[in-house]
Amino acid sequence: MEITDVKITLVDDPALKAITTLTLDACFVIKGIKVVRGNRGLFVAMPSRKLPDGTYQDVAYPSTRELAESIRSLVLERYEKAVSIHTKH
């Protein structure tokens, strides 16, 4: 599976830094992937929904460690690039 497009929307929030849309194999789109600043730095959170008990459940997620790492590294790379471009303006 190939990640064929990544769209980053920067967010002005202390914790939520960006919302990402990924396209896989130029035919499957995943919206709502988040770049979040946590206690140990930036991390990528998959789209989720809030359950009645207040916890969250991912609604889309990679089924292999390799794809998870590919998504994580590419999203963070594109986020850093978007921040760099934004701060130059």
Image (tube, rainbow, N blue to C red):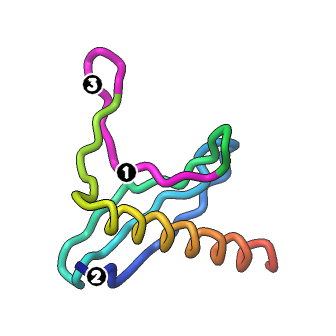
Magenta range is 42-55
| Image coordinates for residue 9, horizontal then vertical, percent | 53, 65
Above or below, comparing residue 77 to residue 37 in the picture: below
Q: Residue at x 44, y 49 (%)?
A: 45
Mark before the other along the chain sequence, 1 or 3: 1
Magenta region includes residue 43: yes
- Residue 2 is labelled as 2
Query: Circle 2 sits in a helix, a strand or a loop, which is it?
Result: loop
Q: Which residue is mark 1?
A: 46
Which residue is drawn at the image coordinates 33% and 79% (left, top)? Answer: 3
Amino acid at dot 2? Glu
What separation in Å lies between label 1 and label 3 (alpha carbons)? 15 Å
Q: Position of residue 42 (x, y in %)?
A: 62, 52
Reply above or below: 41 against 65. Answer: above
Q: Residue at x 42, y 65 (%)?
A: 69
Side of 86 relative to 78 (left or right):
right
Is residue 59 rendered magenta in the image?
A: no
* Secondary structure of residue under mark 3: loop
Identify the residue under disc 3: 51
